[in-house]
Amino acid sequence: MSVLQPPAIRALLAEMFQAAIDSAAPRCSIARFLPPPPKGRTLVIGAGKAAASMAQALEEHWSGPLEGMVVTRYGYAIPTRGIEVVEAAHPVPDAAGLAAAKRMLDMVQGLNEDDLVICLISGGGSSLLPLPAPGIGIEDKQAINKALLASGATISEMNCVRRHLSSIKGGRLAAACHPARVLTLLISDVPGDDPIDIASGPTVADPSTCADALEVVGRYGIALPPAARRLLESGEGESVKPGDKRLARIETHLIATPQMALEAAARVAERAGIPVHLLGDSLEGEARSAGTLLAGIARQVADKGQPFRPPCVLLSGGETTVTVRGKGRGGRNVEFLLALALALRGHPDIHALAGDTDGVDGIEEIAGAIVGPDSLARAWAQGINPAASLDDNDGHGFFGALGDAVVTGPTLTNVNDFRAIYIG
């Protein structure tokens, strides 16, 4: 084992983050899940931050004719041959996403048993396929989405509400493809990798109910437009349930997950002679609480050699949440890091990097940031109060001022948050 110096630590953490991103690239994983071409048509549909890169990888490995359309985030389109790529807004949906969702439902009409639909789904698809249930406008959908994002609700809770206010999520897209065979290929960005929570499950059965959605709305005090409330209270918003005959020919595969990404990052550290301990791929809860908790574990390792001996790296993934109270530039990963730094109080042996593997933490085109023993001191030297920055949910402003932001650009994939803590 070796103890690294600060520049080498930063380089190692950055290399681990890049390895996590690279492991989730569709070109590395999609081929082994593809069936032979069908007797009939092959129609490709899908949505998510990785949808365009998934479509490109599919075309590279597909031997027969195909056609279709996928929807991705603005700035995430890449060249494809036969599959149309449409861009729309994320995380708050817009008219472009609405129009694409309507077109997608129209495209799958009239299929027969000899046809194959390949559905490419990744994180972000909920916002990119915003087709509200009848009576609900896109403005209502935008307002509900904004309220959910600011509420502190988990991704599973948010998606439960979204599924029951939609005309395309919660298995409805797959049901519209009947009687064609549907192959869904998923890149997971959710804790637990449950397909129903990835882009709100447009092609999988949904066991949750309108009553469950109402319970989430009530728990977080989400103001619903009258039409949306009526839809949930009447039960008319029920999604497609397990056992529905229209879903009998559905096949679903996870091609990339947070666990796979963490394991790829771990291999980088282990090649450098640094032991790695995976704390979990599905950590949830408030970002600042997670930062304080993991800081306590890291200090115990550094100072007491418990439960692990340094040097080592603590790795974790999942999706934390931020209850927005301030007016800062946000980001759950930078919120985590700022809380971590405050709890570490400049500990000389601990460094950390946290980022979103899609390259966008919150709504900023910034993946995350890096923390070192001198982060708080450098902030104070610039007249920046770290605790005040945290109270204002201004992690991006804080780390941007220090020059410690991590910027990857669009990664064209998404396996959720990445957190690595080096303890020397």
Image (spheres, rainbow, N blue to C red):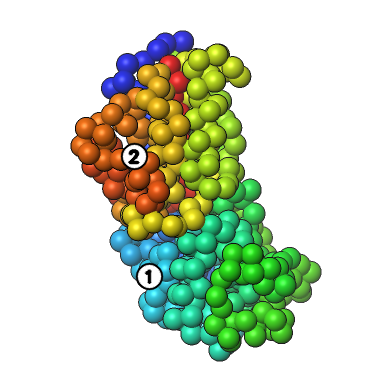
Q: Is residue 260 visible?
A: no
Farthest residue, direction bottom: 135
> How far, Cα to Cα, is label 2 from label 1?
35 Å
**Residue 271 screen position, x and y as percent:** 44, 20
Quarter occupied by residue 95 = bottom left
Residue at 26 percent across and 40 percent down: it is 384
Rendering coords of residue 134 (x, y %) = 57, 87
**Lateral position of residue 47 relative to residue 334, left or right:** right
Few, some or many C-alpha atoms within 10 Å of disc 1 (few <14, some 14-19, many ≥20)?
A: many
Q: Nearer the viewer, residue 403 or 240?
A: 403
Q: Which residue is mark 1?
A: 88
Q: Residue at x 50, y 15 (%)?
A: 303
Residue 151, above or below 281: below
Q: Is residue 81 left or right of residue 185?
A: left
The tag earlier along the polypeptide, 2 or 1, is 1
Q: Nearer the viewer, mark 2 or mark 1?
A: 2
Q: Locate residue 381, reporting x and y percent.
A: 22, 32
Per the image, label 1 sits on a secondary structure element best described as: strand
Residue at the top extreme, as displayed? 1
Measured as percent of width and height from the top left, residue 164 is found at 63, 74
- The quadrant where residue 85 appears: bottom left
Dot 1 amino acid type: Ala
Tell me which corner region of the image, top left, top right, bottom left or bottom right, holds residue 15: top left
- According to the image, label 2 marks what residue? 386
